[in-house]
Every structure is written in C-alpha cells, then in structure tokens.
Amino acid sequence: MQSSRLATALLAAAVASALGCASPVPSYPGSRLPAHAVATLKGDGHVRVLEIDGRPLDGREFEILPGGRLVLFRLVIRGEELHERARGHRRHLICELSFTAVAGHAYRLTRTRPHFEGRSDTVAETRTVHRFETFLVDLTAERQVEEVSGSCRRP
C-alpha cells in the first residue's frame, strides 16, 4: 500500500517535470526567498540560460533577485528557418542580455520567427538575409520590456 503511494507520487513528479511544471531554480546563493521578493525568468523552447550575473547555470526557469541582471543564454535556430535545404541542422548563438528585474514579476525570453529583409538570387549563389530577434516579455505587466541591452555571437 505504501509502495503504491510512493510510486504514484514519483510518477506525478516525473510527469510534472516532463511537462515543465517544476518550480524555478534559485539563481542566487543562500536559502530560497519568498515569491514576492524575487522575479522569475523563463526561456522558451529555443532558449537555454547558461549564466545569470556570472554564476554558471543550465536550464530554462530560474528565480532571480530584483535589480540589474546580466543573463547569458544559448539561442537555438532550426536549419529550416534559415533555408529549406538546411532542414535537420541547428545553429546556436550565445547571447547576453542585461535588464532590471522587478520583484514579484515573471519574465520570459522568447524569439520571433526570422524576418526576411532581402534576397539575392544569382546563378552562383542564393543568399537570404535574416534577422533573429530575442524579446524579454514581462508576463506580469503583459508587455515587452523595452529597457534591455544585449548582443549575440556564434560560439
């Protein structure tokens, strides 16, 4: 009977984790602070957080302290988003973003689909210029965060 309850609890935890329902991991040292004293930062399926304020991390959802934050993350771009012949390939960019977090707010790092700015067709070469943008959205205020600076580079 007790092993059946344990198995059910473990299964529920595994399902919650697989569905992304796990609680955010604190990115700061010390004991966990109450939700109203921290902000939450979550990356979408294309974003993996690597560092927050120079502290190495690896994941998608973290509790962060309020104030100025510097986030290093990996952005994944599917090959077919670059060109139909690149299907199945992936390109990674390492991006850095700085913003001011507000306690009690939830933020999401997300990106748009590529925006085609121009196209050059020649016999020898076909090249498309793409722009990949990453947005920081304040889910609590339901708006895009405008006061953000950052850049991306190839690893």
Image (tube, helix red, strand yellow):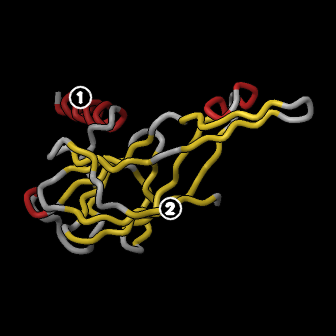
The quarter of the picture where the N terminus appears is top left
Left or right of 152, for residue 14: left
The residue shown at (73%, 31%) is 86
On the picture, is 76 further left or further right than 4?
A: right
Other residues around mark 2 within 10 Å, as few (<14) / some (14–19) / many (≥20): few
Type of amino acid at the residue the image marks with label 2 = Ser
Residue 130's x, y, as percent?
61, 41
Could you tell whether 134 is left or right of 62 in the image? right
| Near-viewer residue (51 or 95) | 95
Q: Secondary structure at mark 1?
A: helix
Q: Is residue 138 above or below residue 17?
A: below
**Quadrant assignment, res 139:** top left
Q: CA distance from mark 1 to mark 2?
A: 45 Å
Q: In percent of the image, x 38 and y 47: which residue is there?
A: 135
Residue 19 vs residue 14, the one in the foreground: 19
Amino acid at the residue labelled 1: Thr
Residue that numbered label 1 is attached to = 8
Percent across and percent down for residue 112 are 45, 37
| Rendered residue at 91%/29% (across/down) | 123
Q: Which mark is residue 71?
A: none
Name the quadrant of the C terminus.
Answer: bottom right
Give residue 103's position: percent from left, percent from top: 13, 61
Residue that badge 2 annotates: 151
23 to 155, vertically: above or below: above
Residue at 50% across, 61% down: 151
